[in-house]
Amino acid sequence: MNWFDTVEFPKDGDGCRWDSTPHDPVIRVRLQGVGHVRVHQHRPVRGRVKTVSVKREGRRWYVILSCNDVPAEPLPATGAVTGIDMGITHFLTTSQGEHQPNPRHGKRTADSLAEAQRALKAFPRRKREQRTAKHRRAVEKVAALHRKVRRRRRDHAHKTALAMVRTYDVIAHERLSIANMARAPKPRPDPETLGGFLPNGAAAKAGLNNSIHDVGWGVFLGILAHKAESAGRKLIPVDPRNTSRTCPRQLCGHASAENRPTQDKFCCAHCGYTDHADRVGALNVAIRAGLVLPDVA
Ligand SMILES: [Zn+2]
């Protein structure tokens, strides 16, 4: 199994078998030509296994299942609705004014990743089999840090999304725009890091930090959509333009960059309404979704 990084078996039972030893509490997967392989299961499997993929990331192997007939788990109605603003200071802020912190992978991991990528760049480009042991370790280090960021981002997204769908029946959020995400320096595909990337240019580190955030919101919204569907909750995406620069008071509605004197502060230049800028963003998201009357703010 040296020549590929992902193998997909389109049908469980054909070339592979999930839970190949059902009489044994240890979970195994049987792969044709390989035999029974023990699997460490991250989450219980729900529904009926449809396809099985085996994927390599660095020196680790993953088994990815897709399932049919996953039972929905509707949650009891809470009567609560909210709008959310996604930001840098706080991962998200609700229109009720509650802040959810950012996952803590931010700066330190981004610094280590930038350093590991610099170290890797010092090696001449070589095919995998021609690399020295040091070069291979440098490649593996970059890949391991990418995995760490991805794992923490997903964990954080799962926890945050679960808390949101438990609390709210309806959640309005900013529609993620590709244009916003393209503001970060374009990642350059790098075959050495197995699905990872090296950012370009001098702004590489800043770009890396931004791209960690942007990808983080995308991952979060994907997971939120999934959990909302399963729980019978409703998500409403809205136009994200100027949400934290527009006065949320219905009789005012003044929109201007002046309304936001600092990153955190909102102060309407027309009527004097003041609030945290992230909460104003969240209120406007809720208003655009038709969830709250502006003057309830
Ligand atoms: Zn105003």
Image: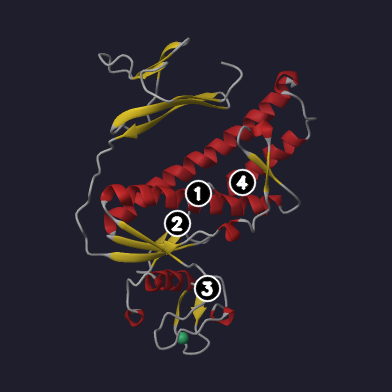
Task: Measure the alpha-carbon separation of dots 1 and 2.
Answer: 8 Å
Looking at numbered disc 1 in the image, what kind of residue is underneath it? Arg
Circle 4 sits on which residue?
Answer: 110
Is the residue under label 1 in contact with that under label 4 (CB below 8 Å)?
no
For the C terminus, which image quadrant? bottom left
For the N terminus, which image quadrant? top right
Circle 2 sits on which residue?
Answer: 101
Dot 4, crowdedness within 10 Å: few (<14), some or many (≥20)?
some
Which tag, 3 or 1, sits closer to the chain's start? 1
Dot 2, crowdedness within 10 Å: few (<14), some or many (≥20)?
some
Task: Measure the alpha-carbon separation of dots 3 and 2.
Answer: 22 Å
Looking at numbered disc 4 in the image, what kind of residue is underneath it? Ala
Is the residue under label 2 in contact with that under label 1 (CB below 8 Å)?
yes
Task: Measure the alpha-carbon separation of dots 3 and 1.
Answer: 28 Å
Query: Does the beta carbon at disc 1 come under 8 Å from ligand 1?
Result: no
Circle 1 sits on which residue?
Answer: 104
Eyeballing the image, is 34 above or below 136?
Answer: above
The residue under the point 44% across, 84% down is 273
Task: Measure the alpha-carbon separation of dots 3 and 4.
Answer: 29 Å
Looking at numbered disc 3 in the image, what kind of residue is underneath it? Asn
Which tag, 3 or 4, sits closer to the chain's start? 4
Looking at numbered disc 2 in the image, what kind of residue is underneath it? Pro
Eyeballing the image, is 29 above or below 51?
Answer: above
